[in-house]
Every structure is written in structure tokens, then in C-alpha cells.
Image (cartoon, rainbow, N blue to C red):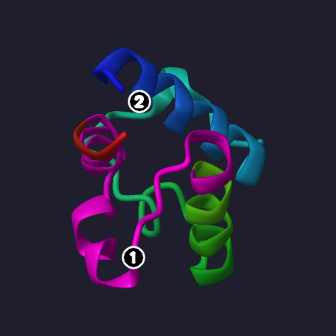
Amino acid sequence: MNEQDARAAVHAAIGEVAPDVDFDDVDEDARLRQDLELDSLDFLRLVETIDKATGVDIPERDYPAVATVKGLIGYLAAHG
């Protein structure tokens, strides 16, 4: 998966889990839980949504690597 596909998958997944997030105002350095205000259940739903959409499983040990929008995009690009 290239970075553009990863970015599209992340935006789609966040849009599904947190439809009130406006990507025009979101910086890629935004932290998913703090800046986008995803609670722990929303974060888990996001990980599951990405797994279903892309087939990329994100194990719990890698959660710190995907704590930001940019980190999640990079993770998907590297593992997808």
C-alpha cells in the first residue's frame, strides 16, 4: 500500500468512527486520542475498521506507533 492509499484508508476509517472530525482542520501530527478526542473504545473501533478495510492488523504493542494521524498513515504504508 502506498502512502496515498494509506492516507485515504485512514481518512475513511476516522470518518466512519468519528464523523464529526473535519479533515480540513486536522494536521497529520494530530494525536488521535487527545486532539481528535477519540476515547479508548473509538480508538479500538478505528483499529478494527482499518483492519477490515485494509487487512492490516495493528497489534496492541504497536499502538504507540499509531498514536497520530501521520503515524497511522506511515504504519499502513509500511505494513499494507
Residue 30 in the magenta stretch? The answer is no
Amino acid beneath label 1: Pro
Amino acid beneath label 2: Ala
- As measured in the structure, the alpha-carbon distance from the residue carrying label 2 to the one carrying label 1 is 17 Å
Residue neighbourhood size for the residue with mark 2, other residues' Cα within 10 Å, grouped as few (<14), some (14–19), many (≥20): many
Residue 26 picture location, percent across and down: 44, 34
Which residue occupies 36% across, 45% down?
Answer: 69
| Quadrant including the C terminus | top left
On residue 59, which mark appears? 1
In this view, the residue in front, 48 or 55, is 55
The picture quadrant where one finds residue 73 is top left
Residue holding disc 2:
6
In this view, the residue in front, 4 or 42, is 4
The span shown in magenta is 51-77
Residue 68 picture location, percent across and down: 31, 54
| Quadrant including the N terminus | top left
Which residue occupies 51% across, 55% down?
Answer: 36
Most common SS among magenta residues: helix
Position of residue 9 relative to residue 62, above or below, is above
Q: Secondary structure at mark 1?
A: loop
Position of residue 11 relative to residue 24, above or below, is below
Which residue occupies 64% across, 64% down?
Answer: 48
Residue 3 picture location, percent across and down: 30, 22
Residue neighbourhood size for the residue with mark 1, other residues' Cα within 10 Å, grouped as few (<14), some (14–19), many (≥20): few
Q: Earlier in the sequence, mark 2 or mark 1?
A: 2
Which residue occupies 41% across, 30% down?
Answer: 6
Q: Secondary structure at mark 2?
A: helix
